[in-house]
Amino acid sequence: MGLLKCGTNFLCRAVRLKGLKYSTRAKMKPGYQQANVVILHKDLADDFEAFCRANSSPLPLLYKSKCGEWSCGPLATGSDIREDCPEYCVFENGVLAKKVASLSSYTPQLQDMVTFYLGCSFGFESALKAAGVPVRNVEQGKNVSMYKTSVACIRAGQFHCPMVVSMRPVPEDKLDAAAQSTHVIPLAHGGPIHIGDPKLLGIQDLSQPDYGDPVKQCPGDVPVFWACGVTGIEAVKSCKPVLAFTHSPGCMFITDQKAETISPLTLEPAHCPLTFCISQNPQHYSIASKRAVQQIRAIEELVVEDPGSRGIRALFLQDELLKACLSLSHSSSVLITTGFPTHYMHNPPEETDGPPGAIAMAAMLQALRKEVVIVTDERALEMNQHIMRDAVEKGVIKTAVPVISFQSNGPDSALQFLCHDGDPSKPRFDHLVAIERSGRATDGNYYNMRGVNIKHLVDPIDDLFTTASTIAGITTTGIGDGGNELGMGKVKAAVKAYMPNGNLIACDVAADFAITAGVSNWGGYAVACALYVLNLCPIHWRYLHSGLGLSLTPDQQSLRMACLPTVAKEEEMLHILVKYGVRSGKTANLGLEVDGLTFHPYHSDIIQRLRNLTLA
């Protein structure tokens, strides 16, 4: 038996900690890096190493032994893997055959086997405590809860399996501290890969963990999930080797090293993770770096400039752009609506604000591989389909977005439109975005800023938003510049208090997020830019992909950059709208003008400044 080095002192590793539950062992060795263990035949070693490299969050590789090597000198002096875990699992043909306290009886077989030591989240619990985050499983004297998920690891050779996660309940006001203190220890799995509703990971019941013990949440706690090295056990099961060994969950190998000393990251202020709630139904939080958050806040401040002196600053809510875009980044299918028939005396009655911003958002969402559909009024359907066709031909957007209409034919029409077979558990879209879309007022009518009722020109697309508010998993965003737009009901009180005709025109339908802009198109451009920023943020990218996979490739980055708004593309978009007789909202001029502001210098200047902020 070897020796355990602790600072300058050596403690006898003969105290093997056998039979002690996790909480007791953790107290004896607080803050030391622990290791999950997988032992495989040498013929599988290269495949498993590749599997670890491809899935480094659940399987951070601390050390790979030589064939037949019992010790792991870089991690623990005098160690012997046959004895140093309190309990081992023995797998035969991928099936757990038994659990044993020692592997010494398997010494002949181990001569042809390779041991993998993998980082473990127990090593960061001291960092959580130091950051003031309570560790509920330790408080309750229990092993941590571990769950198989619906998240598939990246396959390598013969190895493929679902990711396993560990869960620790964290008070909501400690989420930032939990993310920041673990982010800097990547070899102990790093930061969280999910915060919120376990069902989003395919976990149906937190009280029934697949491994470990159930841990009770305290009032105000949020479930936080980290990638877990028990994923290695699932990998062994999937590969079905004739013989394999792992540690028994909760009975890890304890190294001589403090967790924070194993390849720690320096937490630079710009790369500090920050958490944001993006949904309460289901509960869902996202993460981005402080730098990305600051960039998006600067973008948000830019587009709320008010060159028309309309007083729209009174409607502004900080971080609505950020949270809406975090939600969109997690989405898979987005429905966009636009169209404000303010010019009821003209044909067509539409204005130039709305469609350019809608197409700018759609272009970036497509680049992020989201499904996108645009819904508009039936009377304007053919025109908008032609506009989309021309936008593709002129290079404003790479691929045409389907343009459809919605008609209400009964009380369940919106539900049938939004969900497969009208089943609320099967939504077609997970995010709805309205940009410069006429919104229903308290009296059921639709008003332009002059207080003229234009209800006869508007289809009841508002019903999709009100119905979406009752369906778990659908988030909504409204973008507006006056308060009478769909979704701006979230700031209805401010609209009534500060906007001309506010008591009459204020939209009564609230979105989850309300983005205020000096011109609504600018809000659409801001969404495209913010999505670009988020998907270049390594911290958000990792969280978005559950800690799996590689970083964004240069080709992917170039494709997304090409989908950002440019002065040339947006000028071309206005030419297309003018071709179809679409007029400026404030003046009804048929020209390169939006809301009474000519494209040059006003809109072109905003677009260029947005690009400068985004690409900084």
Image (cartoon, rainbow, N blue to C red):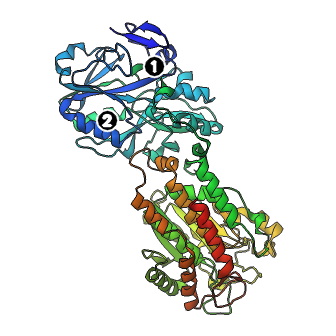
Q: Is residue 588 or residue 468 the one in the foreground?
A: 588
75 vs 615: above or below: above
22 vs 175: above or below: above
Question: Could you tell me which residue is drawn at 38 percent across and 45 percent down?
Answer: 150
Q: Secondary structure at mark 2?
A: helix
Name the quarter where the N terminus is drawn. Answer: top left
Are the two marked residues, 1 and 2, in contact with CB atoms closer than 8 angstroms? Answer: no
Q: Residue type at mark 2?
A: Glu
The reply, left or right, for residue 329 in relation to residue 84 is right
Counting labels gives 2
Residue occupied by mark 1: 22
> Can residue 16 be seen by looking at this rendering?
no
* Residue 55 x/y as whole percent: 36, 41
Question: Could you tell me which residue is drawn at 31 percent across and 35 percent down?
Answer: 234
Question: Could you tell me which residue is drawn at 43 percent across and 76 percent down?
Answer: 400
Residue 477's quadrant in the figure?
bottom right
Residue 592's quadrant in the figure?
bottom right
Bin the neighbour count of mark 1 within 10 Å (Cα to Cα): few under 14, some 14-19, many 20 and up.
many
* Residue 299 x/y as whole percent: 64, 61
> Can residue 426 be seen by looking at this rendering?
yes
